[in-house]
Structure formats: C-alpha cells, structure tokens
Amino acid sequence: MGKELINWENGRWIGQTLEVENGVCAVPSIPAKDEAGELAYTDEVKAATDHLYDDVKDFIPEFEWPAYAPLVHAINKLKRQKNAVILAHNYMTPDIFNLVGDFRGDSLGLAIEATKTKADMIIQGGVHFMAETSKILCPNKKVFIPSMRAGCSLASSITGEDVKLIKQKYPGIPIVTYVNTSADVKAESDICCTSSNAVAIVEHITKERGVNKVIMLPDEFLAKNVAKQTDVQVISWHGRCEVHARFSAQDVRDMRAANPGVVVLAHPECPPEVVSESDFTGSTKAMSDYVGDHKPGKVILLTECSMSDNVAIANPGTDFVRPCNLCPHMKRVTLENIYECLKNETNEILIDEDMRDKAYDAVMRMIEVKFDPIKGHFDPKAKEKFIKVI
Ligand code: SF4
C-alpha cells in the first residue's frame, strides 16, 4: 500500500495529518506524561491553551486536543524565546492557521509581512517557494521550512534555464513570473505577480516597457484567465496547479444542481471554463473577503480544502459546501514538524547571493506596484481569448 497522508473524511478535514505506511498510522499519539517531557499535557499546558480550543472545535475532536495542546503551547513558547514568527498561508490546516500562525494570508500578504517583521526567524507555514520568497526579501533573517518535501507542481514545472531559453526566443517581451516559482526562475524574470495582482502587474509592466505583449510563467490557466481581463497579449508556459486543475465545469454544474442558490467562488488557477461557471473569481484573500463582505447563505470555494475550513471559522453564519481538493505539498507541514524546525533550526533556506539579488528586484518591483484590489478580481463573464502556450 505504501505511504499515504490521511486527514479527511467524507470530503472534509477532520483532524491532524496522519502519515500512514502500509496501513499503520505513524503519528500522532498522546504520549505518556513521563515520556512526553515538554510535550506532556500538563495543568500548565491546559491552562495556557484551553481558551484556544473554541477556534478549532469543529476540526479537532475533543479527545484529540491533549495531543495538539502541548505542541501548540511549545511552539508559541519557542517563538517568544527565539523571536520567531510563523507566516501561515490560507491553505494551512486550521490548527496551524489559527493556533500558531502570526500572520495569515495569501502569497502577496505573506511576502509583504516578511518585509515588515522585526523577528529574527521566520518559519514558513506554506510551501518551499514561499519560504524562498521570504528569504529573498529578508536576507539577514533565518528562514525555515518545516518540510523540505513541501513543493508545488507549478514551481517544479519550470527552471531558470527554461526562462533563459524563452528570453532568447522572445527578446524584448517582459517576463511576468507568478510567485509560485523557485528563486532561480524569479531571478530571470522582469517582475513577479500573485493571483491578487496579476492583471495589474501585466498592465503595469507592458505600459512601462511600451509593449503590448507579456510572457506569463508558469501557470497556463492563470495566464488564460488574465488574458480574458486585459487587452495585453499573453504568451504562457504549460504549468498547472495540480489542485485547481482538477476542477471541471461539469463539477460546478453538478454542485449547483445539488445545492440550489449556492454562491460559487473560484481561484484563478482553475481552468477558464470553471471560472466562467463561477459567480466570483479572485485570490484566496479576495475569496475570503467576499465571504466576509457578502455573507452568502451557502458557498463553495473552488480551491484547496483547508481554505474553506479557515474561512468557515471566521464566518460561522455561512454554510460551506466542500468539494475539497487537497494539496499534498501544503499538507506536509504539520504542528510536529513546525515544532522540530523551531526547536532544532532545521531546514534553513539558503539562496546564492547573486541569484537572491536578482530575484529580489523581481519581487520588489511587484510589491511596489500599487493597484486597486478590485482590479484583482476576474470577471467570470469576460470573453475567452486565444493565447499561445509554449
Ligand atoms: S495548491 Fe497548487 S499552487 Fe498551491 S502549493 Fe499546492 S500545487 Fe502549488
């Protein structure tokens, strides 16, 4: 049977990520008090954490709380001792997102927080490219990723060498690179973008360079969705997010039929035909804001599973239908490996200085572009456009 990760039931996350090998569950168990040391569920831990349980009571069964509370307590103590912060992406499980995350948000929000924090250490609650982005922006801080296996199908679809070849083939056309890429790819790019600001960045860089064409790397679907919102011509790469690419237009129609009146929000990494079937399309932050502002009775977020769990905690009045596509990379980050990483300072992110310098320019150019957040929303009804995919 091999190794698998389980943490959901009936399409819904129900507790801590469990690594199962050949049918045997490796973690977690509640350690006996005398063996557990600083991870024992003592009266002190109970007193310090009881008030936190309410935030995650829908996701962590009460009998499992004594396994979580000592880790949460130890992580929060270590953060204070080491002047560390945890940047938690919206796709982190609710225990990480709500109980130990210091800053929570989408890639853009976390990158901006990385530039502002006074902490000495950053633990990235997210995947490897996000930790690299933090290191690119904060060369003098120690940046760690709890699991080196927390990758991304988009980031692994392209290398810096690929970008050099693209530049030779298309000289003079600005390269706009999604932040979901490795540092060597960013270093070869003119400017980065996120799903919040992609349309604004494409329009900004083409205006600045006096051209009407960009190369958008590496997400084919994001590029196609951006192309629908602008007159700029877009050339793209063939990368895909393995989570969002799984949604289909038929899925949306079936979910609507099963849930009359439901509001469908889609992430722009979804295929364009899925975006066309949605009521609203935007970044994870835009989706979260939409639910907070519009308070729909029933909603579907076409994105990674944990996003619905986290937005549901903040919006108890909304009923969430959870189609649940899980990102295996995001789920490699757990309370256990955050604790190990903080305690032993393992998995530090190191980047060659020349590469970091070039990647810094591409990321900072993005951060400096001021844009109207409404510009970050994608009109689902916009007409599809043909784009070249290389
Ligand atoms: S959800 Fe998609 S884009 Fe995000 S880390 Fe996972 S594979 Fe990459």
Image (spheres, helix red, strand yellow):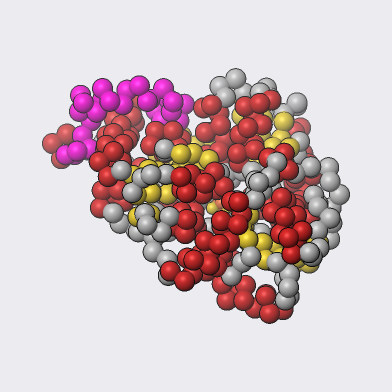
Position of residue 100 measured from the top left corner of the image (x, y, whole percent): 38, 37
At 35% across and 59% down in the image, what residue appears? Answer: 348
- Magenta segment: does it hold 53? yes
Position of residue 130 measured from the top left corner of the image (x, y, whole percent): 49, 54
Front residue of 18/53: it is 53
Rendered view: 258 above or below 105? above
Q: Quadrant of residue 42?
A: top left
Main secondary structure found in the magenta portion: helix
Answer left or right for 325 relative to 36: right
Rendered view: 276 above or below 41? below
At 16% across and 39% down in the image, what residue appears? Answer: 37
At 51% across and 49% down in the image, what residue appears? Answer: 111
Q: Quadrant of the N terminus?
A: bottom left
Front residue of 374/154: it is 374
At 46% across and 45% down in the image, what residue appears? Answer: 116
Position of residue 131 measured from the top left corner of the image (x, y, whole percent): 45, 55
- State whether residue 155 appears in this view: no
Find the magenta span and give its range.
Answer: 36-61
- Magenta segment: does it hold 169? no
Rendered view: 237 above or below 295? below
Q: Quadrant of residue 59?
A: top left
- State whether residue 57 appears in this view: yes
Answer left or right for 53 relative to 313: left
Q: Residue furthest right?
A: 383
Q: Residue furthest top?
A: 317
